[in-house]
Image: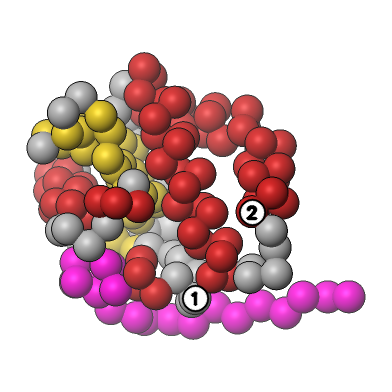
Amino acid sequence: MQIRKAQIKDLKEIDEIYKEGILDEERNQSPRKSKEEVLKELEEFKKYRLNGLKKAINSSKEKFLVCEEQNKLIGFGVAVLSNKKRSAEIALIYLRREQRGKGIGKIIFKELFKWLKEKGEKKVIVTMDITNTPSINLHKKAGFKEVSIIMQKKLK
């Protein structure tokens, strides 16, 4: 297994991993939404998503890492440096379904934390849906603590 900087040529596999993760997240967050609905939404925003991923790969303010095994991407993670409006953050961590629970996410975290420390960051935040138990557990194992609650209400 190898952790390396993401490249534009990795975008197709990165997007596959991302879509797989979103499908699993939506199953928890919106159980009434069908797989077809989720895939349709993902397709509608594909151009926007890929542009955002490209910017992250090329940004000096972001660290975009991929985890590769036998020339196949199995996961990725993105850290973003702080600015005047927000703290440093772990923006994305996604793994292929069959790779979850093997400690790979923790390895990606370790590399992202190392980069953030090198850049002088003192703390890092992450935001996720409260129903995303696997991600919450991964972040807790990486040392994150709950420090705030964000609430929402749908307006009809």
Residue 100 versus residue 8 in the image, above or below: below
Q: Residue furthest right?
A: 156
Residue 134 versus residue 88 in the image, above or below: below
**Identity of the amino acid at label 1?**
Thr
**Identity of the amino acid at label 2?**
Lys
Which one is nearer the viewer's eye here, 132 or 38?
38
Q: Quadrant of residue 135?
A: bottom left
Secondary element type, mark 2: helix
For disc 2, the marked residue is: 35
Q: Quadrant of residue 47?
A: top right
Residue 8 versus residue 110 in the image, above or below: above
Other-residue count near label 1 (Cα within 10 Å), few / some / many at <14 / 14–19 / ≥20 = some
**Picture coordinates of residue 146, whole percent (x, y):** 34, 80
Other-residue count near label 2 (Cα within 10 Å), few / some / many at <14 / 14–19 / ≥20 = some
Indicate the quadrant containing the N terminus: top left, top right, bottom left or bottom right.
top left
In this picture, which residue range is highlighted in magenta?
Answer: 137-156
Q: Is residue 51 left or right of residue 120?
A: right
